[in-house]
């Protein structure tokens, strides 16, 4: 199952894969469970340094040392769930970082230290 998750969360630019910690999958699963199994869309999982660099050069909102580059983060949305509600549910888990991107329609979750932006 973890091999399939690595493949699914691979870098969209290079196709490279990274180890994805079970804790990140557990965060996403807990959020999906909260919303009665609605479809979760993973916008971005693992990012190669090349993809992260390209994104960082286009936006001030992309960290140069993003946890995405270590497979420790995902940007997600859930069908039919307001981004603000998803943010609040993710924060309530107190399982890692939560970033709120309402203009782009997604929430960042990671298994790093608990923090919010």
Image: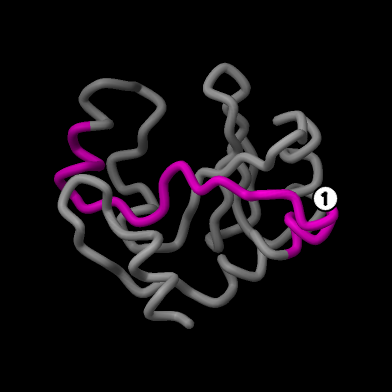
Q: Is residue 39 magenta?
A: yes
| Structural crowding at the residue carrying mark 1, measured as other residues with C-alpha within 10 Å and reported as few (<14), some (14–19) or many (≥20) | some
Quadrant of the rendered image containing residue 26 = bottom right
Residue 40 on the magenta span: yes
Q: Residue at x 39, y 62 (%)?
A: 8
Q: Residue at horizontal 19%, vertical 38%?
A: 53
In the image, residue 21 sits, relative to residue 46, either above or below, namely: below
Element marked by disc 1: loop
Quarter of the picture holding the C terminus: top right
- Between 115 and 2, the one nearer to me in the picture: 2
- Residue at 47% x, 55% y: name it: 73
Up-down relation of residue 103 to residue 92 (above or below):
above
Identify which residue is drawn at 19% across, 45% down.
13
User: Quick check: 84 above or below 7?
Assistant: above
| x and y percentages locating residue 67 in the rendered image | 40, 54
Residues shaded magenta: 30-54
Quadrant hosting residue 103: top right
| Left or right placement of residue 56 versus residue 84 in this view | left
Residue 57, how many percent across, how many down? 21, 25
Residue at mark 1: 35
């Amino acid at each position: 199952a973890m091999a399939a998750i690595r493949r699914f969360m691979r870098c969209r630019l290079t196709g490279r894969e990274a180890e994805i910690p079970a804790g990140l999958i557990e965060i996403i699963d807990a959020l999906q469970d909260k919303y009665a199994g609605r479809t979760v869309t993973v916008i971005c999982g693992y990012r190669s340094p090349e993809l992260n660099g390209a994104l960082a050069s286009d936006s001030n909102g992309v960290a140069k040392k993003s946890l995405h580059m270590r497979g420790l983060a995902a940007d997600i949305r859930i069908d039919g769930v307001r981004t603000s509600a998803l943010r609040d549910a993710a924060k309530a888990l107190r399982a890692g970082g939560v970033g709120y991107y309402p203009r782009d329609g997604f929430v960042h979750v990671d298994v790093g230290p608990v923090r919010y932006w």
